[in-house]
Image (cartoon, rainbow, N blue to C red):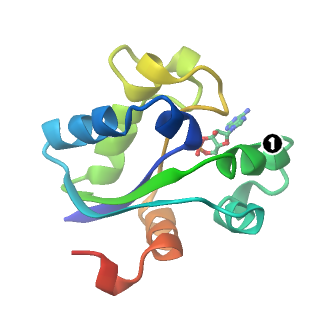
Amino acid sequence: MERTLSIIKPDGVKKNIIGEVIKRFQNANINIAAMKMIKLSKEQAQGFYAVHKERPFFDSLTDFMTSGPIVVMVLEGDDVITQNRKLMGATNFKEADEGTIRKDFATDIEKNVVHGSDAPETAAFEISYFFNALEIV
Ligand code: CMP
C-alpha cells in the first residue's frame, strides 16, 4: 500500500471540478485517506515548491498557488503514485493523454488543475507538509 499527495490547485477549485476530480480517484479505486481545503501563504507555497526555487517559473507558480483555496488530499492504494500521475496526465496539458484530468480541464502549463507527488520520497515530504499522522485515517 502506497500513499501520495494530491492537490486540486486554485484553478481547479475555481472551475468547480473538485467533485469531478474526486470521482476520478474513486472510480479508479483509490482511497482518500485525508482531505482538507486550505489557502496557502506565499511563504507556505515557496516551502512546498522549494525544489523548483531556481526555476524561472517559481515566482509565478507560488503566486498562482496562493491565488485561491486549494484542496489537499492523501491518496492511498497499490502503486498510487503512478496511478495518480496517469489520471492527471502530463504537466503540460498539450502533451497529456486523452481522458486525463489535465487534458480535460487545464488551460496552461502552470494552471494545470492538479498536482501529484512524483516519487515515494517526495510523497513522504509532501504529505507531512500538509498533514500530521492523526489527520490521516
Ligand atoms: P506541478 O506538477 O505542481 O509541479 C510544478 C509546477 O510548476 C507544475 O505542476 C506547473 O504548475 C508549474 N509550471 C509552470 N511552468 C512550468 C514549466 N515550464 N515546466 C514545468 N512546470 C511548470
Percent of width and height locating residue 80: 27, 52
Residue 118 visible? The answer is: no
Query: Of 76 and 105, which appears nearest the observer?
Result: 105
Query: Of 107 and 90, which appears nearest the observer?
Result: 107
Q: How many marks?
A: 1
Residue 83 visible? The answer is: yes
CB at disc 1 and ligand 1 closer than 8 Å: yes
Q: Residues within 10 Å of mark 1 (few under 14, many from 20)?
A: few
Look at 59% across and 20% down and name the residue there: 107
Percent of width and height locating residue 110: 67, 33
Please determine whether, in this image, residue 117 is positioned above or below residue 64. below
Look at 57% across and 42% down and name the residue there: 10
Please determine whether, in this image, residue 13 is positioned above or below residue 44. above
Please determine whether, in this image, residue 20 is positioned above or below residue 54. above
Quadrant location, the N terminus: bottom left
Look at 28% across and 75% down and name the residue there: 136
Q: Amino acid at mark 1?
A: Ser
Secondary structure at numbered mark 1: helix
Percent of width and height locating residue 137: 21, 75
Q: Is residue 3 left or right of residue 5?
A: left
Which quadrant of the frame does ligand 1 lie within?
top right
Q: Is residue 67 left or right of residue 120?
A: right
Q: Is residue 112 left or right of residue 101?
A: right
Q: Residue furthest bottom?
A: 134
Mark 1 = which residue? 60
